Amino acid sequence: MTELENRAHAQKALISSDAMRFFMNATKTEERNEALDAMLIKAKASLIATDGWVVVNLARIETLIDDATAEAVVDTQTEAITAGSLAEALVTGNVIAAFELIAHRPMVALADATADLDAVYRARKGEQTKVSDMLAAETARLSDAQLMAAITALTSALDGTYDSEGAAVKTAIVKAIRAVS
């Protein structure tokens, strides 16, 4: 998935973790690169860019690729993956893109972004992890303390302060962006 994420980033596209799950379920392994390129051409033609980036979340990819089976499977997938662009949006300070990337299931998107930043942190400690080229490059300027502050900010959404999942996640995103700015 990291290869696909890097390919999307090279085309100035951010893809939410749920959209990436949908895409993986809707495409065959041997056809994914071409399918991604085709989907991104459609996305760029139909979506408005945010700070120069096309943001593809689950609702948007469902309009670009018609696959009811993939849609049904994605709704049940909750394990964190390290192939969503929310972490990249956070570390680049792109608040608008970050909010668009959490549209479908905010807590799942937040878990994926936290897993991405955790992978960066663990890589710094010598573990073998996979992160996108963009995330590796954008986090290189951050100190370990800033990275940990962002991870802590993201996990603060789970503390029960907010009744609304969306409000908790958006607040955590703003706090994480502030931590890395």
Image (spheres, rainbow, N blue to C red):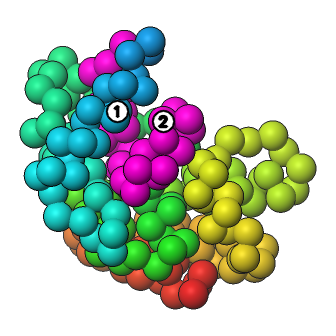
User: What's the residue type where badge 2 is placed?
Assistant: Leu
Residue segment shown in magenta: 1-28
25 is higher (above) or lower (below) than 3:
above
Residue at the spot of label 1: 36
Q: Which of the 4 image quadrants contains residue 147? A: bottom right
Which quadrant of the figure contains the C terminus?
A: bottom right
Residue of label 2: 4
Residue pictured at 56% horizontal, 35% vertical: 3
Q: Left or right: where does residue 104 sit relative to residue 126?
A: left
Q: Nearer the viewer, residue 62 or 47?
A: 47
Q: Amino acid at mark 1?
A: Leu
Left or right of residue 28: residue 143: right
> Which of 20 and 81 lies nearest the eye of the viewer?
20
SS at circle 1: helix
> Residue 114: horizontal and vertical position, in percent?
55, 58
Question: Picture coordinates of residue 71 (x, y %)?
Answer: 19, 28
